[in-house]
Image: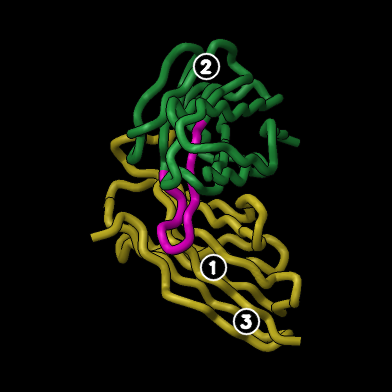
Amino acid sequence: DVKVTQSSRYLVKRTGEKVFLECVQDMDHENMFWYRQDPGLGLRLIYFSYDVKMKEKGDIPEGYSVSREKKERFSLILESASTNQTSMYLCASSLASRGAITYNEQFFGPGTRLTVL
Amino acid sequence: QKEVEQNSGPLSVPEGAIASLNCTYSDRGSQSFFWYRQYSGKSPELIMFIYSNGDKEDGRFTAQLNKASQYVSLLIRDSQPSDSATYLCAVTPLRNDYKLSFGAGTTVTVRA
């Protein structure tokens, strides 16, 4: 089974703090994703990575950065946390292509509920 | 127009009934379609995927895809209280086949 883990289930930080959210997957997946989920707004993609050291902006990258130094680990960084970044953060991973087949299914971690005071 | 739209909920069905969830998508070139289930406070869990027109059955779940109508649905037969959750439809857009576009979700409540 694919396992995606996130470093914290709940996190409380203060405005202006630098926040690191860590995600690790154990299935050798090429693609990794960071989403936030807010009531009424659904899942919104922040950043994704399709390879080590490669990243691409999603729909709402402002205020966030990411790091992928190793294939299994994808970090989301809030450079200076603000109250509007209070949200549920979800990490996901997917296998890329094997031969002519593209695998799109994304598998999610348990989520980190971040509160910024 | 949103890329993926789901029928608005919440949807309440009695135990044992069929729950029918609908999803339409705007990108005609989309190739892969997924249904996720999300319990309150938990992360989404993949329950079905479908790539070809027609029906795909897995236990009590049936996914139906009609690419001409840009429509995908999920039927839950013999609904159980444990099926009470939010169901998310997700579609792979043609222009970027490793991303998913998610619908807002439909919340289903199964009444015992």
Q: Quadrant of residue A69?
A: top right
- Magenta-highlighted residues: A33-44
Residue B43 x, y percent position in the rendering: 63, 50
Q: Main secondary structure of the magenta part?
A: strand
Indicate which disc residue A68 carries: 2
Q: Amino acid at mark 3?
A: Ile
> Is A70 a magenta residue?
no
Do discs 2 and 3 belong to a common subunit? no
Residue A105 x, y percent position in the rendering: 55, 41
Residue density around tag 3, few if under 14, some if 14–19, many if 20 or more, within 10 Å: some
Q: Which chain is green?
A: A
Residue B104 x, y percent position in the rendering: 43, 61
Q: Which chain is yellow?
A: B
Residue that appears at 58% across and 43% down: A114
Chain hosting mark 2: A
Do discs 3 and 1 belong to a common subunit? yes
Residue density around tag 1, few if under 14, some if 14–19, many if 20 or more, within 10 Å: many
Chain hosting mark 1: B
Tell which circle, 3 or 1, labels the residue nearer the N-terminal end.
3
Q: Secondary structure at mark 1?
A: strand
Indicate which disc residue B18 carries: 3
